[in-house]
Image: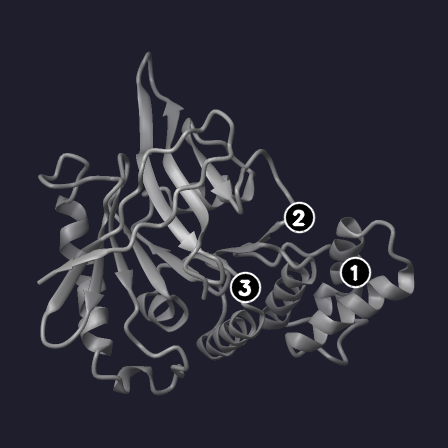
Amino acid sequence: MSTDKFISIEGIAKRYPGAGDGTTTVFENLWLAMARGEFACVIGHSGCGKTTVLNILAGLDEPSEGVVIVDGQAIQGTSLDRAVIFQSHALLPWRTVLGNVAYAVSSKWRNWDRAKVRAHAQVFIDLVGLTGAEHKRPSELSGGMKQRVGIARALSITPKMMLMDEPFSALDALTRGTLQDEVRRICLETGQTAFMITHDVDEAIYLADRIFLMTNGPGAVLAEIVENPLPKDRGRIDLHRHPLYYALRNHIVDFLVSRSKAFTAETPGHDPRNVPMVRIGKPELVIASVAHPQRDHTDGTSWPGLSRPSTSP
């Protein structure tokens, strides 16, 4: 994974008109950054703005203020550089597996002939384990297979960033685990940058390099960034055997159960540009900070480097 700042969310807010002259602030002054090839998960209670952040990254929504930079360019609307996998499979019911994936491919590379489009689509159908199901329509597929098509479709356009909004939440446990394995394998093999929303702590621990913890909304803030200390080659079945697993899990659960309710933008010491980076380790908890320096948004060219975190016991 690169250490370059590939995605930078800089001071964004989302507000909606309320009754009378009031407004509802979902979140504000949100700052976070991701490196190229990083897999990040956002966890927080319903109403904290997780999906809104994802929609802003996708270009489906606009922040009330602030800016989002991806690979040096400010996001302005949707783009085939950013692929979204939704909770529902969102497939075209009249198209086959191959047709759904090929439709995405032809949308990005409009000058490709039919044979090249089909060959490219087939590569990603094979990648998600749907070889032999190319000519089936969504009505003939299980829920897990439909989500595989969604993953293949997203990957087929070789996006710079893959956005996932709880893509496995409606699946049975066995299918969910299998697809978690598939997504992790694919992201590791392709170096895909991924941003995922989940309510499942174990899913975040298994998939993510870093976990962003959001406080309760409205008025939510990013409270902590937790680095995953488990090895990159971790397996889902043996996850709980790692000596740091329960310390990591307990820290996240404790935040969700108790600390997320008490933490607000007015919490003493809270700095949205310098959010604590938590590293779980032996024998103590080490906390570091990632600073977000001021940038000039006027020309879109300045690109400060990701500050190296300082550590303190």
Residue marked by disc 3: 192
Do residues under tags 3 and 2 come within 8 Å of each other at their CB atoms? no
The x and y percentages for residue 270 are: 16, 41
Q: In which quadrant of the rendered view does residue 254 lie?
A: bottom left
Disc 1 crowd, CA 10 A, few/some/many (<14, 14-19, 20+):
many
| Label 2 secondary element | loop
Please, what secondary structure does the residue beneath circle 1 have?
Answer: helix
Badge 3 local density, few (<14 within 10 Å), some, or many (20+)? many
Label pair 3/1, CB-CB below 8 angstroms: no
C-alpha span from label 2 to label 1: 14 Å
Q: Which of the two residues, 199 or 1, is positioned nearer the viewer here?
A: 1
Please tell me whether residue 97 is drawn above or below residue 159 in the rendered image. Answer: below
Quarter containing the C terminus: bottom left
Q: Of callouts 3 and 1, which one flags the residue occurring earlier in the amino acid sequence? A: 1
Which residue is found at the position 41% from the left and 29% from the top? 296
Q: Residue furthest top?
A: 21
Residue 102's tag is: 1
The label shown at residue 38 is none
Q: Which residue is mark 2?
A: 80
Residue for point 46% across, 48% down = 7
Residue type, label 1: Ala
Mark nearer the N terminus (3 vs 2): 2
